[in-house]
Image: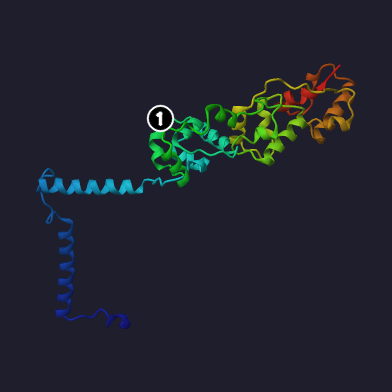
Amino acid sequence: MNIFKSHFWYNKSQRNGIFFLIFFILLLQVIIFSDVFSSDEIIDINKPEIVAFQTQIDSLKAVEIENRKPKIYPFNPNYITDYKGEQLGMSLAEIDRLLAFRSTNKFINSKDEFQQVTKVSDSLLAKIAPYFKFPDWVVNQNNANPRKQSFYKNNDILNAVARSTTDINKATAADFKTINGIGFAFSERIIQYRSKLQGFTFENQLYEVWGLDKIVADKVLSTFKIVDRPIIKKVNVNTVTFKDLLKNPYINYELCKKIFNYRDEVAELQDISELKNIKDFPLEKYDRIVLYLFAN
């Protein structure tokens, strides 16, 4: 206790100082949390000075909002991409028409030709046309011939986007490549898968093409349809060999074994729908599997 006593032993003047300090701290706390500094004065926000200040703040906000908006710089409309077209407000169909036209190695040389090719509305054309920037020689040519008719006639434009067919089962690789997003690789892949299927029977079979994005597939199906269903060569499920059954594009090795085991159990399938009785049979693929099979 003697060790701590020296630290807590104060004379009278020191104790008075400590009490005064404590009192001052308490008084300061009371002042802070009291309404001493509060005021009941009501500020008139309609004063000219305040209104003018608020107007200045609003104008500065409007300028800042305008500065943050994406700016459109002059550009050549011949090189509009999907992303750029969406920024400008063009629809996917309008962008596709432009890209299909450009795939023929032709160029748009005026805003009128741009509208003829893309079929954009007058309002959208008026909005984006001021930003069109064509090569100088094109501008000079247009200025020298103000009454010159469009270089590309309507039938030329139609020929540019025309395809040899709209039947997905007869379309060539060149036909598929007119779709934005379909290049050499995907056009060949679609044709190869179509050959494997012996032709598309259902339009949504296109989604089964390996690596083909659904958005791009939707674009293909918006242009190409199944006009004539393919004639598929079917095999008898009761007599087909294991190897030939595996050629069915929707049957893998495990399912092939199950079909053969079931065939051994029942001796012979009387109806092709009996496949549904097989345990763990992929019912969601039934309509596709039976395209290639029949039963006695």
* Residue at image location 31% in from the left, 83% down from the top: 2
Q: Nearer the viewer, residue 5 or 158?
A: 158
**As displayed, is residue 273 above or below residue 69?**
above
Q: Position of residue 63 (x, y in %)?
A: 28, 48
Residue matched to label 1 = 122
| Tally of marks | 1
Q: Nearer the viewer, residue 25 or 94?
A: 94
> Is residue 52 found left or right of 58 in the rendered image?
left
Location of residue 87 (image quadrant): top left
Quadrant where the image shows the C terminus? top right
> Is residue 15 found left or right of 173 in the rendered image?
left
Quadrant where the image shows the N terminus? bottom left
> Is residue 143 found left or right of 294 in the rendered image?
left
Q: Position of residue 177 (x, y in %)?
A: 64, 36
* Residue at image location 79% in from the left, 31% down from the top: 251
Location of residue 273 (image quadrant): top right
Secondary structure of residue under mark 1 = helix
* Residue at image location 77% in from the left, 23% down from the top: 291
